[in-house]
Each structure stands twice: as C-alpha cells, then as structure tokens.
Image (cartoon, rainbow, N blue to C red):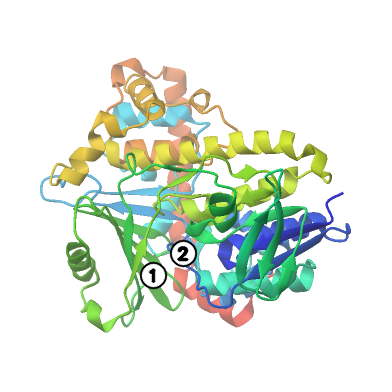
C-alpha cells in the first residue's frame, strides 16, 4: 500500500494536485504532504480558466460564492479574438470562441456555410456571444452554486487561488503542509528517488510529485527525463505581464480578449477589481523593446508607472510525465502559451487523472505509468495542434511571424491532415478519436469558422428536411438571444450581488 505521497512545490499546480490527491486518499491511511519554499512566488502567466474548473471546485467541495469573493473572480464565457485575421475593408477582424456546445447539430454548420456566412458564426450557432457582446452574466443570483443559464468559467487571481486551495486541502482534506527548501534529491541504485534532503530534514515517500516549475528539479534534473521542445511549432517564448486598474465606470467583460500583434498577441483578462494584461511574443521575430511598445500602446498608459514582469516561457513537455516513482505536474511537466487557458486546464486534467488512476500498490506503478505517459503525451500534442491552428490559418501577411506560422514545415502532420480534410467536409466527431482530447470538435469549429476557413460548400449540401430542422433550431437560438438580453444581469452587477449576498447552495 502507498503510505506517503510528497508533493514538492506549491503554486496553483501543486495545490490542485494536493486537493485531487487529498480527496482521493482522505481517510485511507495514505499521507499526502506538500512541501514548498516560502520564497518562490506564483508565476501566474494566465488567470483564465475553462468550464472544467467549475466542475473541479464543486468536486473539491469549495463554496463558489466564497471562491468568487476571495480570488477576485469575474465570470468568463469565452474568448474574443481580435486582429487574428487581416483587416477587411479597413475593419478589424473579430470573432468569439464561447463555451456554447452545439456540435451534435452539424446541419447548423452546413447551413451557415451555405447561406449565412455573412453572419458571425458564434451568433448563428448559439446565444452566448450575445451575452458577451452586452457585458451580461452567465447566471442569475437565484441560481445555485456552479449552475448557470450558460456555460462559464472564471478569471481569477492566481496567488489568491493558490491560497484558497492550500487552506481547503489542509483544513478539509487532511493534506500536510510544510515550508522547506529542497537541497538534494537522492537517487537509489535502481534509479528511483530514495529520499529528499531539505533544510528541515529528510523526506521519504512512495511517490513524489514534481511541481517545481520550469526547473523540474525531480523529474528533469534528478531523473534526467528529457524535455521535448516545441518552439519550432509554437514560436512565442516570452511574455510581459502587468496588472492594470480599471478606469472609472469601465465594464467588466465576461470574456478574455486576445488581440494579435506583429509577433504575438496580448491577453486582457478582467478580474473583479483589476485587469491582468500581458503580451506573449516570439523573441525570434521581435525585440522586448518593441513588445513593450506594443503593450504600452494597447493599454494606453505609460508602462513605466506600472510593475511589468518579463517571463521566459519554455514551450514543450517532458518525454515522460511519470518516471519511476516520480510524476511531474504543472510547469515541470510541460507548457504552451496561455492562448486558450491551456496551463490550468492541463494541470487540472492531469492531476485529476493521476488521482483517479493511481494504484494503491507500488507494484502496479510501471503498468499504470505507461498508460499515463501515453495519455499525457497525446494530450500535449493535441493542445499544441489546437493552439497552432489559430496561427496557421490566419491570412495576415504583415510580418515574418505570421508568414512563418503558415509555413508547412512548422505545422504538425496531424494538424495538416485534418486541415486538408476540412477543406472538403465539415468536421465531425469522427475526426476526434481521443477521449482525452481537451479541445474537441466545438472548439475547432469556433476557431475554423470564426477565421473563415474555406470548406468547400458544394461538398456539404443540406437536404430540405435538414434545412427545415435547422430553421427550427435557429428560431430557438434567436429566442434564447432575446431572452438573454432581457433577463441576464450586467456582469459587474451580478458580481456585486455575490459579494453582498453570496450564492445559494444546491
């Protein structure tokens, strides 16, 4: 039986792991302990999440109202992509990737391609873009925790979120917490980690979880598991990040803004009391000085008055996430730019998968780790494909960055094959075979047709029966859009109410 699990490193990844493992092993006799340095700040590259985080917090048993108040939370209903295509008649290109799900209605997509492509794709297939356009909330104050009229996720303060997860893991799930600085990882003759030497003593465990960030002190440095770089596919390797106050009477948008630049893009994430803004860019295509100027122009204020952080991003993943008696989670395992809130998503998915599949006896580690590694590697490759999609189907030609992103040499074969297929047919579920494809058909459809991907209309005809059925669906969507405008609260107004009254339990 596994008697002890030691997590090395805190931050969001470490404390997500602690909660997942603490929940799994609570009351079982297996000790879950997290050790972290008191001197390492949370990186917090992105502060956006996807709807799975809602499920995770509910599973942990965290009060949604308290989470919203403590973590400076605002609702997120998707992403607004701006300037990712060349201007049309002088007008900036914009499209939404909301959290609406509609993929079972592929007739809807075909109808849009054939007859309605002059309408926004997101507006045609759902009502959530209407909520975003009017700064409306995804739920009502009368709806219970984690329920909504529309699917939603969160914008949050990463540091405050880590503290909330820490408190919950320790007080509710029995996780032991200790501040210690790691001094040495001792490897046994069989290649496994024997014990850790810290400034407070020796730590010995059956399983070690590496959450030490990009340094990957256990899996990468001590166990020598190689890193597979993906900078030849995703070029962005640097970021400038800054916290910006709201101007007077500024709306709190319920979506992330992602605005493309000459060699990257700028995220704009509205929390309850401030914004988190950052410029992700490729150092091979621009300089930090130019990136700084573009960020300053976007914000419209002198950045010298704000605290701008420069962040190096190590894009890629470890060849194995689980080796011997050590599993890497978070940045120790891998990283890609935070374009679709990829960081917290993969950290959460892999931590939950580990907790759910971890055998109680070390004898099974080798067998289980093989499957775990295959799944995680596939997950990273699928995430990289999806992020690359945003770049390689753009028609921008104003810089080498955008031209290089369209180079076939930089596009993975798995994505090239799908793009070739989708020139002739609308994507279907059959094009997405993996259960752990964290980005699925709905996500692809929003990006493909938000960016006017040229699927051949003549190969995707719609029958008269299907046309009638789609017409009924469109009427329902239009009614939902009308109801949304009439019933939904202003996003800030709902957050104000939650801060005042909290949220009802189920």
Residue 146 visible in the picture: no
Nearest the eye: 213 or 16: 213
State which quarter of the image contains the C terminus.
Answer: bottom right
- Mark 2, Cα crowd under 10 Å, few <14 / some 14-19 / many 20+, is many
The residue identified by callout 1 is 276
For image coordinates 57% across by 64% down, the residue present is 12
In the rendering, at what x and y percent does residue 125 appear? 42, 40
Nearest the eye: 269 or 296: 296
Mark 2 residue element:
loop
Q: Is residue 346 left or right of residue 243?
A: right
Nearest the eye: 38 or 199: 199
Res 109 → quadrant: top left
Q: Is residue 85 left or right of residue 89?
A: right
Residue situated furthest front in the rendering? 189
For image coordinates 44% across by 44% down, the residue present is 126
For the image, the number of numbered tags is 2
In the rendering, at what x and y percent does residue 139 appear? 55, 62
The residue identified by callout 2 is 47
In the rendering, at what x and y percent does residue 493 appear? 48, 75
Nearest the eye: 276 or 159: 159
Mark 1 residue element:
strand
């Amino acid at each position: 039986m596994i008697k002890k699990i030691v997590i090395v490193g805190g931050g969001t990844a470490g404390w997500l792991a602690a909660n997942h493992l603490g929940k799994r092993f609570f009351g079982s006799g297996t000790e879950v302990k997290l050790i972290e340095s008191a001197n390492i700040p949370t990186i917090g590259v992105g502060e956006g999440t996807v709807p799975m985080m809602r499920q995770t917090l509910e599973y942990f048993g965290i009060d949604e109202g308290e989470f919203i108040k403590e973590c400076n939370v605002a609702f997120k209903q998707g992403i607004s992509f701006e300037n990712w295509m060349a201007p049309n008649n002088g007008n900036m290109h914009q499209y939404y990737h909301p959290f609406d799900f509609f993929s079972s209605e592929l007739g809807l997509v075909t109808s849009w391609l054939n007859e309605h492509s002059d309408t926004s794709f997101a507006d045609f297939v759902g009502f959530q873009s209407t909520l975003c356009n009017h700064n409306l909330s995804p739920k009502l104050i009368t709806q219970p925790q984690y329920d909504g009229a529309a699917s939603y996720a969160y914008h949050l303060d990463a540091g405050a979120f880590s503290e909330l997860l820490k408190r919950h893991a320790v007080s509710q799930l029995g996780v032991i917490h200790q501040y210690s600085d790691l001094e040495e990882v001792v490897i046994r003759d069989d290649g496994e980690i024997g014990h850790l030497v810290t400034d407070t003593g020796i730590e010995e465990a059956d399983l070690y979880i590496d959450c030490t960030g990009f340094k990957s002190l256990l899996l990468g440095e001590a166990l020598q598991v190689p890193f597979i770089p993906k900078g030849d596919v995703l070029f962005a390797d640097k970021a400038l990040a800054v916290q910006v106050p709201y101007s007077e009477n500024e709306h709190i948008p319920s979506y992330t803004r992602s605005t493309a630049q000459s060699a990257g893009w700028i995220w704009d994430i509205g929390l309850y009391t401030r914004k988190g803004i950052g410029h992700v860019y490729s150092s091979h295509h621009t300089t930090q000085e130019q990136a700084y100027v573009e960020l300053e122009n976007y914000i419209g204020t002198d950045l010298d008055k704000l605290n701008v952080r420069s962040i190096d991003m190590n894009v890629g993943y470890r060849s194995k996430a689980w080796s011997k008696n050590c599993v890497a989670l978070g940045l120790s395992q891998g990283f890609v730019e935070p374009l679709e809130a990829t960081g917290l998503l993969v950290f959460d998915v892999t931590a939950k998968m580990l907790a759910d599949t971890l055998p109680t006896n070390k004898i099974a580690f080798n067998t289980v780790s093989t499957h775990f590694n295959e799944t995680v590697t596939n997950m990273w490759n699928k995430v990289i494909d999806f992020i690359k999609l945003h770049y390689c189907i753009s028609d921008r030609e104003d810089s080498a960055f955008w031209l290089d992103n369209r180079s076939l040499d930089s596009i993975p074969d798995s994505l090239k094959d799908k793009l070739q297929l989708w020139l002739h047919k609308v994507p279907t579920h059959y094009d997405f075979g993996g259960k752990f494809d964290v980005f699925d058909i709905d996500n692809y459809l929003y990006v493909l047709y938000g960016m006017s991907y040229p699927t051949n209309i003549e190969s995707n005809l719609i029958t008269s029966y299907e046309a009638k059925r789609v017409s009924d669906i469109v009427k329902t969507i239009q009614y939902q859009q009308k109801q949304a405008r009439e019933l939904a609260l202003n996003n800030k107004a709902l957050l104000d109410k939650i801060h005042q009254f909290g949220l009802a339990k189920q």
